Image (tube, helix red, strand yellow):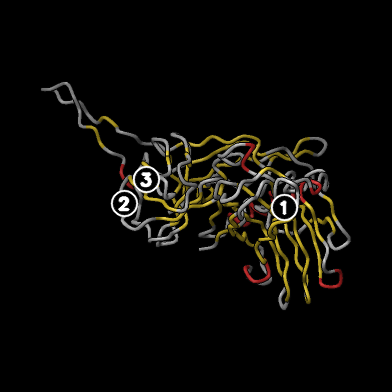
């Protein structure tokens, strides 16, 4: 079934609910009690909210999304949190979505700030570069080094679009430096080799800081020898965006690996999204802190059971979980003088 892009920045507010719980049925006339029933594997999340009021110029994105929702089988991913569950310190890169301009990035001649034309669930502004202006950089944080330590793993990711036939390298790179500021090593992710040509996708990689590291400078480097590329929403963090499933997970226990050793991955009450074998993507809430062992493994205790047994190494979203939803509101809109348009939005989990 089709998964369509959910617009960014359209919900003014959202209310999530998961009906059920341990419900009491008819009470016994003899005992005065009733059986408690587990709501089981079919617990379904619902979400409703207010859509921001729009003008004719700004309503196109939501109007196009709502029209696509009317296609039978159309599903979409609604963010369950406003931003990363890890908080403001999650991303070492300032202004990763280029909102309000490119500051504090330093853009050399190879990179141009553009409206990306990306699907609306990606950031709308980003950087463009091509092979005619290779071997220049876009420096995050104006090239200022951020503190980092030897042996720490830096989780890198970015949304990118690489043109068909592009060759060479376009790297999200890190210069690791010692206490004196001298370069020790340059590591990173070559987006040309990691991305599928001619489509927007999120690319992820990890690099480990070498001995003597005291700081890191994060940047894009254009080494394209043919073609073009666009990038947006880069991230560099100690915390991974995703973990992987360990075989044997089922019921209310989800075994994870790939976490930061000896660090709390999630707090009780936070969410995760696990990809299931059928293509279902289940949003779950954890009932206790998810604390990683010294080997980076942990067991997440879930408030609701898994609908399927996940495959080993299936991805689990930790930073920005979502619900895979389908629309339940009646398509339509209101028009007020101005003209100003208003819409209603509601959806239920699709599985």
State how far apart marks 3 and 2 are (Cα).
11 Å
**What is the quadrant of residue 31 in the picture?**
top left
Residue shown at the point (69%, 53%) measured from the top left? 176
- In percent of width and height, residue 128 lies at 80, 62
Q: Residues within 10 Å of mark 3 (few under 14, many from 20)?
A: many
- In percent of width and height, residue 298 lies at 39, 46
- In percent of width and height, residue 261 lies at 46, 46
State how far apart marks 2 and 1 are (Cα).
39 Å
Name the residue that disc number 1 marks.
218
Name the residue that disc number 2 marks.
250
Name the residue that disc number 3 marks.
299
Q: Of marks 2 and 1, which one's residue comes earlier in the chain?
A: 1
Q: Residues within 10 Å of mark 2 (few under 14, many from 20)?
A: some
Closest to the observer, 31 or 192: 192
Q: Of marks 3 and 2, which one's residue comes earlier in the chain?
A: 2
Residue shown at the point (22%, 29%) measured from the top left? 26
Q: Residues within 10 Å of mark 1 (few under 14, many from 20)?
A: many
Circle nearer the viewer, 2 or 1: 1
Per the image, label 1 sits on a secondary structure element best described as: strand
Closest to the observer, 346 or 189: 189
Residue 286 is left or right of residue 165, and the answer is left
* Whether label 1 touches label 3, CB < 8 Å: no
Circle nearer the viewer, 1 or 3: 1
Q: Of marks 1 and 3, which one's residue comes earlier in the chain?
A: 1
Tell me the tag on residue 345.
none
Closest to the observer, 52 or 238: 238
């Amino acid at each position: 079934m089709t998964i369509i892009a959910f617009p960014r920045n359209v919900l003014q507010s959202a209310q999530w609910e998961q009906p059920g719980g341990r419900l009491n049925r008819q009470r016994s006339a003899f005992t005065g009690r009733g059986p408690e029933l587990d709501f089981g594997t079919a617990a379904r999340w619902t979400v409703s909210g207010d859509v921001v009021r729009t003008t004719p110029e700004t309503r196109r994105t939501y109007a196009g999304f709502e029209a696509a929702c009317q296609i039978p089988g159309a599903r979409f991913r609604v963010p369950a949190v406003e931003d990363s569950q890890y908080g403001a310190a999650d991303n070492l890169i300032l202004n990763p979505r280029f909102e309000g301009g490119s500051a504090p990035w330093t853009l050399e001649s190879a990179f141009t700030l553009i409206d990306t034309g990306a699907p609306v669930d990606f950031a709308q502004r980003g950087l463009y570069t091509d092979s005619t202006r290779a071997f220049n950089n876009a420096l995050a944080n104006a090239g200022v080094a951020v503190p980092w330590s030897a042996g720490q793993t830096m989780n890198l990711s970015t949304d990118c679009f690489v043109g068909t036939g592009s060759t060479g390298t376009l790297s999200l790179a890190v210069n690791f430096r010692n206490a004196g500021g001298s370069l020790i090593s340059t590591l990173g992710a070559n987006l040309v080799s990691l991305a599928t040509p001619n489509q927007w996708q999120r690319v992820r990689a990890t690099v480990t800081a070498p001995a003597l590291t005291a700081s890191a400078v994060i940047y894009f480097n254009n080494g394209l020898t043919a073609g073009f590329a666009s990038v947006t929403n880069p991230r560099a963090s100690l915390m991974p965006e995703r973990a992987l499933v360990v075989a044997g997970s089922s019921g209310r226990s989800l075994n994870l690996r790939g976490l930061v050793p000896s660090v709390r991955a999630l707090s009780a009450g936070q969410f995760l999204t696990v990809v299931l074998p059928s293509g279902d993507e289940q949003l779950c809430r954890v009932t206790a802190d998810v604390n990683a062992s010294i080997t980076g493994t942990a067991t997440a205790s879930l408030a609701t059971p898994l609908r399927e047994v996940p495959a080993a190494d299936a991805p689990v979203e930790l930073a920005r979980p979502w619900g895979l939803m389908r629309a339940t509101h009646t398509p339509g809109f209101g028009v007020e003088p101005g003209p100003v348009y208003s819409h209603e939005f509601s959806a239920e989990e699709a599985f």
